[in-house]
């Protein structure tokens, strides 16, 4: 089963994916995490990717599908619950994905869950977000359930937490514009395919997790 998590940055897709992975063994594929890992390698490609991420722009569709494919092929798509977090992000990426599924994984069950939240709340969430640069776990300065046990340090591996380079206000605004222009049309696209589930995510992380789990188990 494939669950596509659709929604602007800061709507909680990564946090819910993390919880579904930890508690329910759902496989979490995040193209954003894959690119951040690539940046850490500091290769020529990693440096190029870093500049694009920093500006809040999208990586080209060809490279994005290549890195996604490398990850997705590690799993048994029919037997496992797979979350695609942050892919597809435009219509062309969706078409590439569905063409691939139609060709190599026919009859796969696919749902798209749209995480819906107002921009004002998104900006508040992103400017208070922290991330572990080692494991990618997401924290939040004000959400009690997402605060690290020891301030500024990852609960799991004790690495010092950082603010993502693209969680600065200039990049956030750019990412929201790109989301409206490129990603939002996917709501209509998935609705026409009859696989869209709308979800209001103006709630606490644990409640959103519970709601998503219920949807996935139905
Ligand atoms: P995320 O962690 O999902 O917010 O992604 C962080 C950044 O990675 C995005 O702002 C893009 O620069 C890049 N990225 C992640 N997923 C994609 C995608 N599907 N297509 C293009 N760029 C992506």
Image (spheres, rainbow, N blue to C red):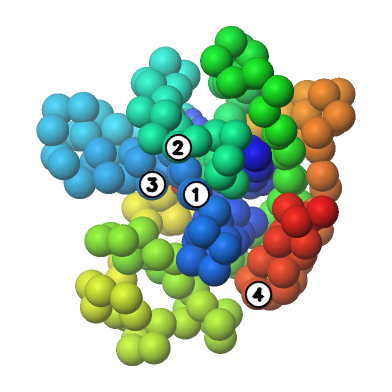
Q: Where is residue 31 in the image (x, y as percent from the top left)?
A: 44, 38
The answer to whether residue 140 of the structure is visible from this angle is: yes
Q: Mark 1 and 3 residues: CB-CB less than 8 Å, in contact?
A: no
Image point (20%, 34%), residue name: 47
Quadrant containing the N terminus is top right
| Mark 4 vs mark 2: in front | 2
165 sits to left or right of 61: left
For label 4, the residue is 206
Q: Residue 27 carries which label?
A: 1
Seen in the picture, residue 171 relative to 207 is either above or below; the reply is: above
- Tell me if mark 3 has few (under 14), some (14-19) or many (20+) residues whose alpha carbon lies within 10 angstroms of its own: some
Quadrant containing the C terminus is bottom right
Disc 3 is placed on an element classified as helix
Q: Mark 2 and 1 residues: CB-CB less than 8 Å, in contact?
A: yes
Image point (20%, 46%), residue name: 40
The answer to whether the beta carbon of the residue marked 3 is less than 8 Å from any atom of ligand 1 is yes
Disc 2 is placed on an element classified as loop
Going from N to C along the chain, the mark reached first, 4 or 2, is: 2
Spatial CA distance of label 1 from label 3 is 13 Å
For label 2, the residue is 75
Going from N to C along the chain, the mark reached first, 1 or 4, is: 1
Going from N to C along the chain, the mark reached first, 2 or 1, is: 1
Spatial CA distance of label 1 from label 4 is 18 Å
Spatial CA distance of label 4 from label 2 is 27 Å
Seen in the picture, residue 49 relative to 104 is either above or below; the reply is: below
Q: Residue 189's image quarter?
A: top right
């Amino acid at each position: 089963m494939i669950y596509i998590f659709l929604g602007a940055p800061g709507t909680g897709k990564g946090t819910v994916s993390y919880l579904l992975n930890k508690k329910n063994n759902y496989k979490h594929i995040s193209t954003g995490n894959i690119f951040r890992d690539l940046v850490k390698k500091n290769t020529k490609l990693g440096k190029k990717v870093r500049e694009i991420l920093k500006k809040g722009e999208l990586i080209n569709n060809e490279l994005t599908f290549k890195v996604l494919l490398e990850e997705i092929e590690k799993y048994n798509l029919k037997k496992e619950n797979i979350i695609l977090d942050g892919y597809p992000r435009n219509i062309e990426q969706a078409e590439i994905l569905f063409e691939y599924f139609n060709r190599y994984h026919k009859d796969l069950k696919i749902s798209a869950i749209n995480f819906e939240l107002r921009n004002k709340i998104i900006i508040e969430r992103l400017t208070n977000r922290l991330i572990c640069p080692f494991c990618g776990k997401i924290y939040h300065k004000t959400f009690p359930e997402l605060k690290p046990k020891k301030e500024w340090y990852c609960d799991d591996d004790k690495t010092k937490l950082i603010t993502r380079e693209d969680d600065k206000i200039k990049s956030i605004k750019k990412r929201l514009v790109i989301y409206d222009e490129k990603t939002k049309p996917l709501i209509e696209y998935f609705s026409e395919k009859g696989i869209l589930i709308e979800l209001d995510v103006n709630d606490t992380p644990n409640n959103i997790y519970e709601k998503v789990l219920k949807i996935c188990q139905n």
